[in-house]
Amino acid sequence: MNVKIRTAKTWIDNLRLAAHPEGGYFSETYRSSSKSDFYGIADRKAGNGQNSIRNLCTSIYFLIERGRPSKLHRLQSDEIWYFHDGCPVHLIVISPSGKLTELYLGLDVSAGERPQVLVPANHWFGAKLRESEDPMADAFGLFGCAMAPGFDFVDFELGNKTKLTTEFPQYEKIIAELT
């Protein structure tokens, strides 16, 4: 039996992943050819100065490494995360009303992990690899993310440490870690 060692570099090279502005690496795997006016303003400009026509769905591979988290950001669409390989991920989600939710993406369902999780639209969220007592634990996590309506960078907002700390002072430590 030929055992292949999977490392972050192996995945990054073979899936042709590129650096993402929020941290980590990604590659788009699907963008539907069908489009729709999801925000009801096709002939007007959306508040962000862009047209509101979006692809119905998009999907990506996404990889993060230990000590290099996905920084707090928010999207205007729901995003579903799927576990593929490596270390489970710990997602921190802050709702518009300020409720913090912790999600664990992985395969150990008895430890509270789920193989897929949903991050609702307009919620601040970031991700880091789940803590492990094993010093040899996988130093990366590979996931899939799907969005509907599909991803568009004009709908992506990276968190600002000062603004987020002012809005959610109770999460100052988490915000500092993920911005």
Image (tube, rainbow, N blue to C red):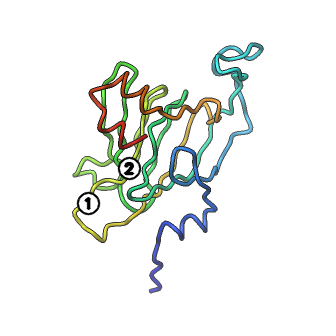
Q: Nearer the viewer, residue 169 or 41?
A: 169
Q: Residues within 10 Å of mark 2 (few under 14, many from 20)?
A: many
> In the shown orientation, is residue 90 left or right of residue 77?
left
| Amino acid type, label 1 | Ser
**Label 2: which residue?**
128
Residue drawn at x 33%, y 55% is 107
Q: Position of residue 43 (x, y in %)?
A: 77, 14
Q: Position of residue 11 (x, y in %)?
A: 54, 66
Q: Nearer the viewer, residue 74 or 113?
A: 74
Identify the element where label 1 is drawn: loop
Q: Where is residue 14 in the image (x, y as percent from the top left)?
A: 61, 68
In this view, the residue farthest toward the front is 162
**Label 1: which residue?**
132
> In the shown orientation, is residue 119 left or right of residue 108?
right
Above or below, comparing residue 143 to residue 172 in the picture: below
Residue drawn at x 74%, y 13% is 44
